[in-house]
Image (tube, rainbow, N blue to C red):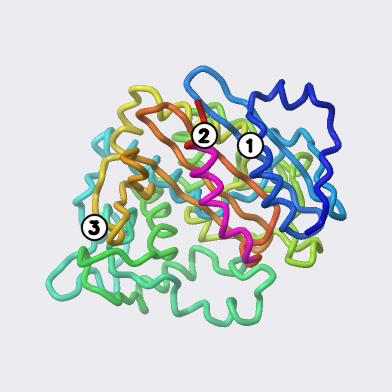
Amino acid sequence: MKKIAILVHFYLSSLIGQNQSQIDSINFLLNQLPNNSQIAVAFVNSENVSYYGAINQNGEIKQIDNHKSVFEIGSITKVMTSTILANLVREGKVTLDDSLQKHVPFKLKRPDKNGKTVTIKMLSNHTSGLTRMPNNMLFDLLFNSKNPYKKYDLNRMEKYYKKRMKMNRSPGESALYSNIGVAFLGHVLGYVENIRYDQLLDKYVISMYGMTSTSLDRNKIKDNLVLGVNNNGKVVSNWDLSAFNPAGGILSSVEDLSRFARANFTEDPVLQLQRERTAKYNENIDIALGWLIFNEHNEIIYWHNGGTGGYSSDMSINVNAKKSIIILSNVSALVKEVKQFRSLNFSLLSEMD
């Protein structure tokens, strides 16, 4: 194994407030990641937020300040889309049990199956029965792998729902992770409000929680953007999620996501609604609106992760204990070692005071 050299002054570790065991765990994983990999970690509680950042440069782990740096957060975006949904439910503009067809301005190809109707809630908690990806973007996935979503605009997504909408299971039968489902949910909420998804995101998430470095528009945050890398440590293209923005298009920092995490420690009725259990995800995991729910040693943990061609992310919240861990990295989700992020996250969370 490469020798880990922490090129920092000791006082910096004291300043950020993490114990050495936590820092060692982060650095141990970072040392397994490609050259030029970065990790930004936020340790969040009800009173304060502390940060740890580091980069792997030719086998040396150097501590850096990257708490304001911006990364693609991938599917953690789904949590934010469900926050928008919870807002519109609280405002009485939709109900979770409304049929999808009720809020779509065109006729769906298949709004139900086996007598069961797709509802708004089912798009959020992955129980609609919809496939993971639409069958009219296979070419993009196969031949545009460097930026597979770029040409899949809202017009193509609407055509899918009009002419090719497909369910592999009956609505409500069981959970089946669906990017096309959550992506369309964001646009359906836009139909309800008669505004675009990016405007919804700004109104109900970015502005609401003071997330000043969070955006769907890379040009707005380009000065703080960390470049993503592949398994060889080479810079890769950013992904343009286009119509899939509501499922994975947000760029953000650990500082901004910390603000959202801390809002979950309050009596915010929207976030309380969002965290309510809605279905069983699998034998061991429940699902709320956007969040997956774990029971770890009798502690309820709300969690989601994300991954794109050049980035990986992992976020957990223990509401009862008022603590959260957020991990952002510029390492492709295709790098196998990033699968360790969840176990690292839960370990760091359990070690927090």
- In the picture of the structure, the residue carrying the numbered disc 2 is 351
Question: Mark 2 near mark 3, Cβ–Cβ under 8 Å?
Answer: no
User: What's the residue at 29%, 52% (across, down)?
Assistant: 286
- Residue 162 is situated, as x and y percent measured from the top left of the image, at 35, 73
Foreground pick, 128 / 194: 128
- Residue 173 is situated, as x and y percent measured from the top left of the image, at 20, 67
User: What's the residue at 70%, 33% (across, down)?
Assistant: 68
Which residue range is magenta in the image?
336-349
Residue furthest to the top in view is: 47
Count the marks: how many?
Answer: 3
Residue 21, numbered label: 1
Residue type at the position of mark 2: Glu
Main SS of residues in magenta: helix
Residue type at the position of mark 1: Ser
- In the picture of the structure, the residue carrying the numbered disc 3 is 119
Within-10-Å neighbours for mark 2: few <14, some 14–19, many 20+: few
Discs 2/3, front: 2
Foreground pick, 308 / 96: 308
- Residue 28 is situated, as x and y percent measured from the top left of the image, at 69, 49
User: What's the residue at 68%, 25% (across, down)?
Assistant: 16
Mark nearer the N terminus (2 vs 3): 3
For the residues marked 3 and 1, what is the alpha-carbon distance in whole angstroms?
46 Å
- Residue 127 is situated, as x and y percent measured from the top left of the image, at 28, 62
Mark nearer the N terminus (1 vs 2): 1
Question: Which quadrant of the structure image shows residue 123?
Answer: bottom left
